[in-house]
Image (cartoon, grey):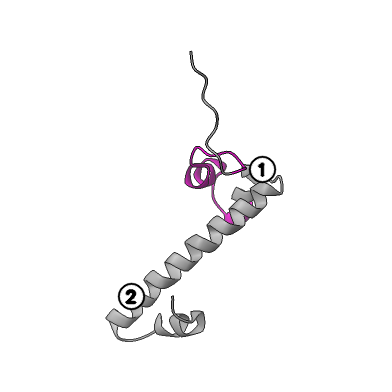
Amino acid sequence: MADTAAVATAAGSTDPTVGLKAVRSLRVLVERLETLQVRNAREQGWTWEQIAQLLGVTRQAVHKKHAGGRSISGRAPLRRKD
């Protein structure tokens, strides 16, 4: 990924090709940062509600996006054999 400052500057370009590519790069960066910080918060014991409030979304939205059927440790939950 290109230098973040350069990408931010490019996002304001009058050339749509340059601007849209920069927007895409920034979107990828934001998604990675959100994932990193949500994981960090969960590892520190934060609830989905606390995270959601700070992100300005619902608890259900943040859980759906980041829980992914994984436990806090990152491992898939154990399934019972019936």
Q: How many marks?
A: 2
Which stretch is magenta? 53-73
N-term mark: 1 or 2: 2
Residue 10: give x, y in percent of width and height: 40, 84
Can you tell which quarter of the image residue 18 is in? bottom left
**Which residue is labeled 1 in the image?**
47
Can you tell which quarter of the image residue 58 is in? top right
Asked if the residue at tag 2 contacts the one at tag 1, i.e. Cβ–Cβ closer than 8 Å, the answer is no
Classify 73 as above or below 3: above
Q: Residue at x 52, y 20 (%)?
A: 80
Amino acid type, residue under disc 1 in the picture: Thr
Does the magenta-highlighted stretch encompass residue 60?
A: yes
**Which residue is labeled 2 in the image?**
20
Residue 7: give x, y in percent of width and height: 44, 80
Amino acid type, residue under disc 2 in the picture: Leu
Classify 69 as above or below 25: above
Residue 43: give x, y in percent of width and height: 67, 48
Can you tell which quarter of the image residue 78 is in? top right
Foreground of the two, 54 or 35: 35
